[in-house]
Amino acid sequence: MNIFTIIIIVVVGGILASIRQINQYQRGVMLSLGKYTGIKEPGWRLVFPIFQSMQKIDMRTMVVDVPPQDTITKDNVTVTVNAVIYYKIFDAAKAVLEVQSYHYAVSQLSQTTMRNVVGSVTLDELLSSRDRISDHIQEIVDKASDPWGVKVESVELKDIQLPQNMQRTIAKQAEAEREKRAVIITSEGEVLASENLAKAARTLAETPGALHLRTLQSINDISSDQSNTVVFAVPLEVLRALEGMAKKLNS
């Protein structure tokens, strides 16, 4: 094997060893002699060892699971809150050059921001306005991470855990509220029923013979069951009518 063949083998081996593959969802940040020289697009790229280095950056949406944080709300209630943050890299060069570890930085920034935002609201606001608080956290984290080439797409509060005594208090409050609504609905129904009864009484009083027909109908309903004993009170008007008829017959 001559020197020319050895040189060819070394050159070919060096080229093969210098090939780096960048997938479609990645971008390569190229450094030559320690200086930033550009972004490499997906495909096969040559990166010559010693002189050059390349760091691949994933451009897909990534997830940060913010661990549970013990936080004191504005009204001095201790709660445990955790969240999930969705973000993606929009500038691969900044993600490498401007921050040491963008994923770790986003995670730490999210934790401190979540504690600060939750600490600035009351417990009622935290429970009733989770979307608004999530949007506020997103705005703060997105603005702070923008110099790193990071775009925060959304923040979701996953779980809010309350102390046991506070859970019992909220349960009692909810039960009292349900009882209050039940009493109001019952009283409103009684008012409507009394108005209808009053209207029916006026109708019976104003219509001649209506009361007698209603009485006969009630007797008919009661007498349908043979086990019932019916005590019928004859109206005074009927007795007077019978007395008048008796006097006429005797005269």
Image (cartoon, rainbow, N blue to C red):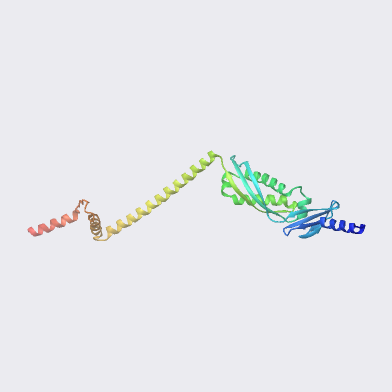
Question: Which quarter of the image is occupied by the C terminus?
Answer: bottom left
The residue sitting at the right extreme is 3
Counting the numbered discs, the total is 0
Q: Tell me: residue 78, above or below residue 201.
A: above
The one nearer the camera, 87 or 72, is: 87
Q: Position of residue 224 (x, y in %)?
A: 23, 56
The residue sitting at the front extreme is 1
**Residue 8 horizontal side relative to residue 57, left or right:** right
- The answer to whether residue 3 is visible is yes
**Residue 151 horizontal side relative to residue 6, left or right:** left
The residue sitting at the top extreme is 165
**Residue 144 horizontal side relative to residue 179, left or right:** right
Classify residue 160 by image quadrant: top right
- The answer to whether residue 41 is visible is no
Residue at 28% from the left image edge and 59% from the top image edge: 206
Residue at 42% from the left image edge and 49% from the top image edge: 184
Q: Position of residue 80 (x, y in %)?
A: 60, 42
The one nearer the camera, 5 or 156, is: 5
Q: Position of residue 142 (x, y in %)?
A: 70, 52
Residue at 65% from the left image edge and 48% from the top image edge: 65
Q: Tell me: residue 189, above or below residue 171.
A: below
The one nearer the camera, 65 or 192, is: 65
Question: Which quarter of the image is occupied by the N terminus?
Answer: bottom right
Q: Position of residue 110 (x, y in %)?
A: 67, 47
Classify residue 71 by image quadrant: top right
**Residue 157 horizontal side relative to residue 170, left or right:** right
The residue sitting at the left extreme is 251
The one nearer the camera, 178 or 210, is: 178
